[in-house]
Image (cartoon, helix red, strand yellow):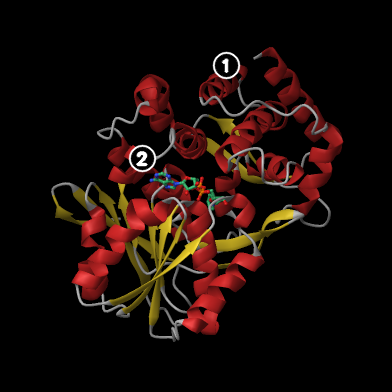
């Protein structure tokens, strides 16, 4: 998978996508390391991408990193404009996408434009969706600045926005032209957001990589106080794992569903709380706890391994669980999930640490029982 090294501190590998009917090869590079921000303009130029740039960032990432990315493009002779959006999951809506269309129109940005998403997963998902749909599709690149976006959302081409009754219900599979991951940006990430991103890292260990899971258990305290020496390898490993899954199943026809471990319950928690109480990572932390319990009853996940997963998730310290949500409310919210088929709620469940299977449809009582176990677990904390 790896194709080369740009310089000693930056590694590069390609996401290779399944062939289309015309048998053409499709792939795009991911650059990971310290100082990647300064190579974006030259790399975009080298790859023959449009020279008309529109950078999309949010109210936090605009001044932290958008300015620098913008200056890099201007210094390299590009025409670069800016769009700044309000931050946060509550703004991941069709209205925000509409505001991007309006600004692109006002800037007279045509099909020869490139969108550059500088921010967390919210900015990446919204910008990617705007790129997929504006003028029937213009290219975009991802510059993820949160840990969650670096290890997960910037890779794989799932883009979209929420509706009030469900997460990511409008969207597309639309791959970026490049992904630029500067792990140096993690130094400004608030602790809560870092822990939120670590939830997705724990997910990769739990579903695909027992060695990564062991490393997280061992080095967890160091990771909470960003030791930037540990992050490049961890971010790269997660991207490799995600790229290997996407290479086999770009459109989530099967295997890619394993990446949703913890997300069936997690998305229901987010929807039940109006996307306002928890970060995405916190919601899936609780989702993974419930789905670990479900894995014990439905997939015979050994109790000692379940205990290790739940202890590691507890160490992430998500915002306190809201006991007012109610088991029935969470259960009903799961029917808004994209994965529901023929009225059945689908889960990806573990058989062991590092081993996950998909397409499970437990009965109502089993699902509600795992939610009750989650609620009683959080009460004991
Ligand atoms: N497309 C996918 O495959 C995929 C996968 C997983 C998650 N997601 C989506 O990702 C979103 C969550 O992403 P997120 O956790 O990055 O949320 P986010 O984009 O809201 O970022 C979290 C906060 O951190 C701030 N921030 C980002 N980088 C920063 C930095 N370096 N320094 C300081 N502040 C910074 C942001 O401004 C924001 O306030 C959810 O909408 C989720 O559905 C998508």
At a point 24% along the width and 54% down the height, the residue shown is 36
The N terminus: image quadrant: bottom left
Q: Relative to 200, does residue 169 appear above or below in the rendering?
A: below
The answer to which of 21 and 371 lies nearer the viewer is 371
- The CA distance from mark 2 to mark 1 is 36 Å
Which residue is situated farthest in the left direction here? Answer: 8
Q: Residues within 10 Å of mark 1 (few under 14, many from 20)?
A: few
- Number of callouts: 2
Quarter of the view holding residue 76: bottom left
Look at the numbered disc 1 and give the secondary structure of its residue: helix
The C terminus: image quadrant: top right
User: In the shown orientation, is residue 14 left or right of residue 21?
Assistant: left
The answer to which of 21 and 72 lies nearer the viewer is 72
Residue 363 appearing in the image: no
Q: Which residue is mark 1?
A: 304
Q: Which residue is mark 2?
A: 188
At a point 40% along the width and 23% down the height, the residue shown is 220
Residue 272, percent across and down?
76, 43
- Callout in the foreground (2, 1): 2
The answer to which of 126 and 371 lies nearer the viewer is 126
Whether the residue carrying mark 1 lies under 8 Å from ligand 1 is answered with: no
Residue 230, percent across and down?
29, 32
At a point 26% along the width and 56% down the height, the residue shown is 37
Is label 2 in contact with label 1 (beta carbons under 8 Å)? no
Whether the residue carrying mark 2 lies under 8 Å from ligand 1 is answered with: yes
- The image's mark for residue 174 is none
């Amino acid at each position: 998978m790896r194709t080369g090294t740009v310089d000693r501190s930056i590694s590069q590998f390609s996401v290779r996508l399944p062939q289309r009917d015309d048998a053409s090869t499709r792939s795009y590079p991911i650059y990971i390391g310290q100082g990647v921000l300064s190579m974006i303009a030259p790399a975009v130029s080298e790859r023959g991408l449009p020279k008309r740039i529109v950078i999309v960032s949010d109210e936090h990432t605009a001044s932290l990193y958008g300015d620098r990315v913008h200056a890099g493009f201007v210094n390299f002779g590009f025409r670069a404009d800016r769009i700044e959006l309000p931050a946060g999951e509550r703004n991941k809506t069709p209205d925000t996408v509409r505001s991007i269309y309006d600004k692109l129109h006002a800037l007279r940005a045509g099909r020869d434009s490139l969108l550059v998403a500088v921010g967390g997963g919210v900015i990446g998902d919204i910008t990617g969706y705007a790129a997929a749909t504006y003028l029937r599709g213009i290219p975009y690149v991802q510059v993820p600045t949160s840990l969650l976006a670096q290890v997960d959302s910037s890779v794989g081409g799932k883009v979209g926005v929420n509706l009030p009754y469900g997460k990511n219900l409008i969207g597309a599979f639309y791959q970026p032209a490049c992904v630029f991951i500067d792990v140096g940006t993690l130094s400004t990430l608030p602790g809560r957001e870092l822990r939120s991103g670590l939830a997705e890292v724990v997910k990769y260990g739990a579903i695909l990589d027992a060695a990564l899971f062991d490393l997280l258990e061992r080095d967890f305290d160091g990771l909470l106080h960003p030791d930037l020496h540990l992050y490049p390898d961890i971010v790269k490993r997660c991207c490799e794992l995600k790229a290997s899954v996407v290479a086999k199943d770009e459109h989530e026809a099967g295997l890619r569903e394993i990446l949703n471990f913890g997300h069936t319950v997690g998305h229901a928690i987010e929807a039940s709380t109006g996307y306002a109480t928890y970060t995405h990572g916190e919601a899936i932390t609780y989702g993974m706890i419930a789905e670990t319990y479900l894995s014990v009853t439905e997939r015979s996940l050994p109790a000692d391994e379940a205990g290790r997963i739940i202890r590691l998730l507890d160490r992430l310290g998500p915002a306190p669980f809201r006991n007012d949500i109610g088991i029935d409310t969470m259960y009903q919210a799961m029917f808004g999930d994209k994965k529901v088929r023929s009225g059945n709620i689908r889960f990806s469940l573990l058989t062991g640490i590092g081993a996950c299977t998909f397409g499970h449809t437990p009965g109502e009582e089993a699902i509600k029982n795992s939610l009750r176990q989650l609620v009683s677990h959080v009460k004991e904390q």
